[in-house]
Every structure is written in structure tokens, then in C-alpha cells.
Amino acid sequence: MVSWKLPWRTGSGNSAALRIDDPSLRIVAEGADETVPSSAALASCGFDEVAPVVLRHLLQLPPVEVDAVMARLAADGYVRDPAAESDGAEDGSISVTIARVLPVDAVVLSRERARMSSMMSRAGGRVTGWAVLRVPDTR
């Protein structure tokens, strides 16, 4: 029997070293258009790795929904990233930026984007974008 040791499942990867508040993080892929497939968005910027990265989602929420949504997202390892947030929108909604460290490929990104869209739909909010960030190679 073959045994696979995946770094994000065994804890041996560098995801523990990667933090969402690391000032050296740089955006390597991003999108704001819901109609663009995740695979196309990642391919257009040449992103094809499965190493852990920071996945960031930009959300607009009604103020009364922020705490409930954050509680649901915290259960999945997402934390609020206030350094990346902007001012609220003209409609009174609040801009919330959440982030999580995980290995990302087109399937994972598609799943997470769909989850955010579904959650925002139920909360009366909307997704305004996403970004994949990583520390630049120093090699």
C-alpha cells in the first residue's frame, strides 16, 4: 500500500511559518469577476503550485451580519485581516477582509469562492474579490 505524506495534512509543511499579517506577502493571483473560472484566473498569472499560501476574500456585509459571518468563518480557520480592509460602501455595508493559510489549486479556490458567494448570499452581502498571496522567492 502506498502512503502519501501531504505537508498540509501532516503538519510538516511551512504553513505554520506563513502568517496572514506577514508584511512581505505579495499578491500572485487575484480576481473580482465572478464569471472567470478559478483555473483560468490562476493560469493567467502562471500560478501552478500547491504550497501553502494566504487566500484572502474581500467581502461587503450589512453591519448586523458581520459577527455571525465571522463566527462561521472562524470555524474554518479564517481570520479577519483588518490591514487589507477598506472603507465601507455607500450602501452602508461594511468591508470585511478575511484570510486563511492553505494550499491552493483551481479546485480549492473554486470551492472557497463558491462557499463565500453562498454565505454572502444568505447574509445579504456580496463578494467583491479574492487574492492569493505568498512570500516572494529569495532564491
Image (tube, rainbow, N blue to C red):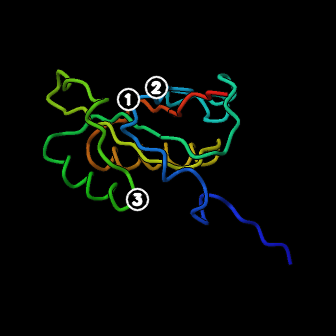
The local secondary structure at tag 1 comes to strand
Q: Quadrant of residue 93?
A: top left
Residue at point 31% right, 29% down? 84
Image position, residue 114 (x, y; %) = 49, 46
Label 3: how many residues lie within 10 Å, few (<14), some (14-19) or many (20+)?
Answer: few
Q: CA distance from mark 2 to mark 3?
A: 22 Å
Image position, residue 75 (x, y; %) = 35, 62
> In the figure, 14 relative to 92: above or below?
below
Q: Which residue is mark 2?
A: 32
In the rendered structure, which amino acid carries the disc numbered 2? Ala
Residue at point 28% right, 39% down? 125
Furthest toward the bottom, the residue is 1
Name the mark on residue 76: 3
Residues at circles 1 and 2 in contact by the CB criterion of under 8 Å:
yes
In the rendered structure, which amino acid carries the disc numbered 1? Thr
Q: Nearer the viewer, residue 137 or 107?
A: 137
Q: Nearer the viewer, mark 3 or mark 1?
A: 3
Residue at point 54% right, 41% down? 53
* In this rendering, position of residue 60 left or right of residue 105: left
* Dot 2 or dot 3, earlier in sequence: 2
Q: Which residue is mark 1?
A: 128
In the rendered structure, which amino acid carries the disc numbered 3? Asp
